[in-house]
Image: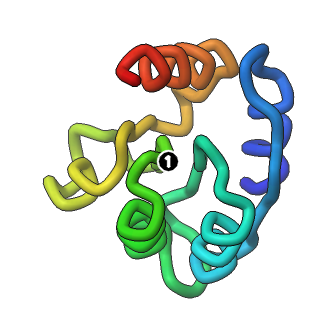
């Protein structure tokens, strides 16, 4: 999944890849050190897991846009999972244009 997310971000017009993580722990560490504007993270990360990683990233970097992706349809996720991230996307709906749109919506709020 990491390569797919990397390629997806590279295909956007508004975003560039700052880092990539193989585990939830590494995602949290990179978010703290690289201070990205946006994080796209898989719900099913090895180790810490995507949901806990999202919580920790948002706790330390509340202004970071966090997009949680999952093979579980958003309608079937728990309210906790839906509330933890700024956006939740079903993997089959991932597209560069959608990430660009989420980024533009996020920056328009500022």
Pick whichever, 77 or 63, lies toward us. 63
Of the 4 image quadrants, the one containing the N terminus is bottom right
Of the 4 image quadrants, the one containing the C terminus is top left
Quadrant housing residue 19: bottom right
Pick whichever, 14 or 24, lies toward us. 14
Pick whichever, 57 or 61, lies toward us. 61
Please state if 69 lies on the left or on the right of 17 as rendered.
Answer: left
Residue for badge 1 = 64
Q: Residue at coordinates 18% horizontally, 60% vertically from top-left?
A: 80
- Extreme-front residue of the structure: 110
Q: Residue at coordinates 58% horizontally, 73% vertically from top-left?
A: 28
Residue 90 rendering spot, x and y as whole percentages: 45, 37
Up-down relation of residue 75 to residue 109 (above or below): below
Residue 38 rendering spot, x and y as whole percentages: 59, 42
Please state if 30 lies on the left or on the right of 58 as rendered.
Answer: right
Can see residue 68?
A: yes
Q: Residue at coordinates 43% horizontally, 46% vertically from top-left?
A: 63
Query: How busy is the neighbourhood of tag 1: few (under 14 within 10 Å), some, or many (20 plus)?
Result: some
């Amino acid at each position: 999944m990491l390569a797919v997310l990397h390629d997806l971000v590279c295909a956007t017009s508004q975003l560039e890849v700052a880092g990539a993580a193989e585990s939830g722990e590494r995602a949290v560490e990179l978010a703290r050190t690289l201070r990205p504007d946006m994080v796209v993270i898989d719900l099913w990360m090895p180790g810490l897991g995507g949901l806990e990683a999202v919580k920790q990233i948002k706790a330390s970097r509340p202004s970071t846009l966090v997009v949680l992706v999952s093979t579980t349809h958003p309608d079937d996720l728990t309210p906790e999972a839906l509330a933890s991230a700024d956006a939740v996307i079903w993997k089959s709906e991932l597209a560069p244009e959608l990430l660009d749109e989420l980024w533009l919506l996020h920056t328009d709020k500022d």
